Image (cartoon, helix red, strand yellow):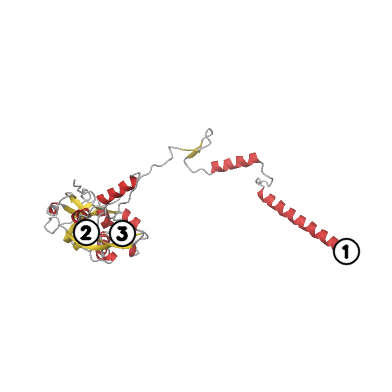
Amino acid sequence: MVTRTAKKKTAKKKTAKKKTAKAKTNGAAKKRVSRAPNGKPRRPAEKNRDLQNTRLTDMPAGIKHSSKTKEPTVDKASSKRLEIEDIEVRKLQLTFIGPHAMTNRFSEADLDKIEKDQTSEVRTKKTKAELPPRKPIEEFLHHCHICEGKYMMSWHEKGKNTYGFPAVGIKKGFAQVCHKLGLSANMIDIIRFMFVHGPYEGLIPFLHKNGKPVQPRMQRDAVYLKDAKKGRIATPAYRPVFENWQMTVQVEYLPMLISKESVVKGFELAGRFIGLGSWTNERGGIYGGYTVDPKVIELPPDFQFENIR
């Protein structure tokens, strides 16, 4: 049996809970009520008018409000024109000297083969018996960056070409060494404020000391290709190696961001620890290293880079 006292206690608890819930509801409602400066609840019309007045008073100088469009308009009389001052740009000419360098250009023949396979409606995978025999001389020439000449020629005619290396790769080596030494948070910031000119559509030629083009020798190495079924497959690669080379590198930079001495020092470190081309010191190889000739030429501001072709 439930006594009368227990019933009263239960009723009191229920009443207290209802009062607490009602107080919370009223408090939340009070928080949501927008009030005017005089403390009274704000009407929707007054709220919108005060908001409009606030926007009008917060307009910066030179901005007027149009009554027709209700959008801010710029006062032409008080607006200021953007003025950009002249920024000093300097140009240097450096000479890189290296014992040997290997290049590994992605050939146009391989690119055409990939494009044809991906754009054709029917893709057929050729078997090993259907593949044409490899041509080492053509593969060797296609791995070269040719400044002047052509790719499809015989072994005895390869001496008529002028070979080079992309200027973008040289600038990337400079950015890599600066990034790895902690001089910049990322490589993009370094690449943006420096320009390395390549006179042959972005290529810088390999030359001898007498100015004649360096002719490469063909080197055969074993490389490993990845296959989904067979794993690593060994195959020979025919790549060019340039010996006793030097190249003239013209650089444009901003002295407000980097000094002349830092530019020269950066390329010296890049030649020692990064290199250019394939199988460099960075990759555990022996090719692509170079030194910078101490004779650095400062080019005049009005100097125009030469574009050949």
Residue 191 shown left or right of residue 158 in the figure: right
Residue 241, image x, y percentages: 19, 60
Eye-nearest disc, 2 or 1: 2
Query: Alpha-carbon neighbours of circle 3 within 10 Å: few (<14), some, or many (≥20)?
Result: many
Eye-nearest disc, 1 or 3: 1
In the image, is residue 115 above or below residue 241?
above
Task: Compare residues 234 and 76 and report the one nearer the observer.
Answer: 234
Q: Secondary structure at mark 2?
A: strand
Identity of the residue furthest to the top in this view: 68
Q: Tell me if I can see residue 292 in this picture.
A: no
Q: Which residue is mark 1?
A: 3
Q: Secondary structure at mark 3?
A: helix
Inter-mark Cα distance, 2 to 1: 103 Å
Residue 81, image x, y percentages: 38, 42
Task: Compare residues 126 and 303 and report the one nearer the observer.
Answer: 126
Q: Earlier in the sequence, mark 3 or mark 2?
A: 3
Location of the N terminus by quadrant is bottom right
Q: Earlier in the sequence, mark 1 or mark 3?
A: 1
Q: Tell me if I can see residue 218 in this picture.
A: yes
Residue 252, image x, y percentages: 26, 53
Residue 99, image x, y percentages: 18, 64
Amino acid type indicated by mark 1: Thr
In the image, is residue 282 above or below residue 143?
below
Q: Which residue is mark 2?
A: 239
